[in-house]
Amino acid sequence: MSESALSSPVWPVGALCQAIGKALEAHFNPLRVAGEISGFTRAASGHCYFSLKDVNGQLRCAMFRRAASQLTQLPRDGDRVEVSGRIGVYEPRGELQFIVENLQRAGQGSLFEQFLERKQRLEAQGLFDVARKRAPMAMPRGIGIVTSLGAAALHDVVTTLQRRVPHLPIVLVPASVQGEQAAAELVRALQQLYRAATDGSLDALGSPIDTILLVRGGGAMEDLWAFNDELLAHTLAASPLPVITGIGHETDFTIADFVADVRAPTPTAAAELVCLSTVAALGALSELDNRLRLAAQRCQDRQAQSLDRLAARLGRLSVAVDRQQARLRGLAQGLQHALRLQLQQRQSALQRQPERLSASVQRALVQQRSALEVAQLHLQALDPALVLGRGYAWLSDQQGRALTSVAHIQAGQTLRAALRDGCAELTALSTKQN
């Protein structure tokens, strides 16, 4: 193993999956993908799961209930579709997956290819650089709006501004937001606001404008196509004022969104981002609330996916599982308490037992010492040397066998007598039995 590999940090599996997921989301999203439906299933929860494949590979997809509810007809295996959404990692299994926010039949791919080609070219020219983007003023003196007079987005924006900052002046320059002439009209409307902001012609209104809102409601890609115009992109890049776009719904992205200083997910959100509310703390709290909801929704989506996988294996036993989990938690707490109590009791008993054992050993040692002394006295009394010292002898034959009877001795036999201080060899002259 190389030295660099040994010095690299050790990643926990879950942390690595999270890091990979965040990197994918930051680098690739949002995305549109075209392919063929495979393995389509819809869970009881309303969430849909399938794979999107072509001849070169396949991608696991999840379409949650709120997005699936927008489908007029569920797709079938083999259908050619185009989907939009975000790529990420399903962390519990470490799998790449695509969260589908929108699904439609194939056929609009040419527009999307033009969008990608134009986006790549303008990005190479630096129009999307973060360094050139400006943060809108927290408290602007006035707001310029470019949208259609008949657009629902205008009503949403004006209503929001009146609610949040009713004192703020608004300058509306209308323009078409859909159709062949829409791009040119949007360019002219923006340029009119640029001139008014730079030459001071709006001073007669009492307050010049400091921020521009470019907004319209949602729609299909062809409906939003005017906002992908290349001349409009360069016009936005040349703006002397910060521009906030609120085009379509949260999942809709246009070239104008990438060029603008700030991209809001909806026209209403753009009106909320244009300045702080009367109480700045409430505005900050609202932003935190939005972020929390988004994070909670994604967390809920991940948990819903996990629950769907479990539901496929366990059927409708989730209620019973919850009860068993609660019961197990209670049993675990009771077991922990019982184990602690039993451990304390055993520790006390064990302490008493060594104390009793130590006393017993001491008593046994005293008893054994006394018995040993008595045995020594008995052994000394039985010592043959003491008997020999009193004038007795120990007779044995030449083989060392003890002779305890005259019946074992023959006349002329050589004997051996062991005395207190040595041995003597004797010859038996005769034997006589009592």
Image: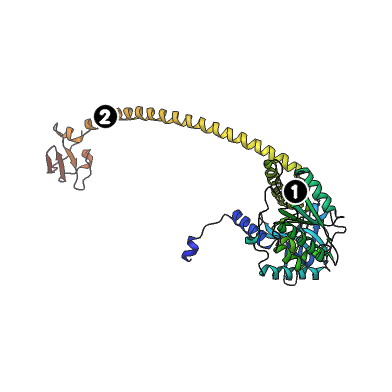
Residue 186's spot in the image, x, y percent? 80, 62
Residue 227 in which image quadrant: bottom right
Q: Circle 2 sits on which residue?
A: 373
Depth check: 284 or 238 in front? 238
Q: Nearer the viewer, mark 1 or mark 2?
A: 1
Residue 419's spot in the image, x, y percent? 14, 38
Q: Circle 1 sits on which residue?
A: 206
Q: Quadrant of the C terminus?
A: top left
Q: Secondary structure at mark 2?
A: helix
Q: Are marks 1 and 2 in contact (CB under 8 Å)?
A: no
Q: Earlier in the sequence, mark 1 or mark 2?
A: 1
Q: Is residue 157 left or right of residue 374?
A: right
Q: Across the whole image, how many numbered discs are drawn on residues?
A: 2
Residue 389's spot in the image, x, y percent? 14, 33
Examine the rendered structure and indicate whether residue 351 appears above or below residue 305: above
The dot on residue 285 is none
Residue 420 visible in image: yes
Gap in angstroms between the C-alphas marked 1 and 2: 123 Å
Depth check: 355 or 364 in front? 355
Circle 2 packing at 10 Å, graded few (<14), some (14-19), many (20+), is few
Q: Is residue 168 left or right of residue 93?
A: right
Query: Which residue corresponds to the image point at 69% horizontal and 37% vertical from the top-left?
Result: 327
Task: Report the amino acid beneath label 2.
Answer: Glu
Examine the rendered structure and indicate whether residue 146 appears above or below residue 382: below
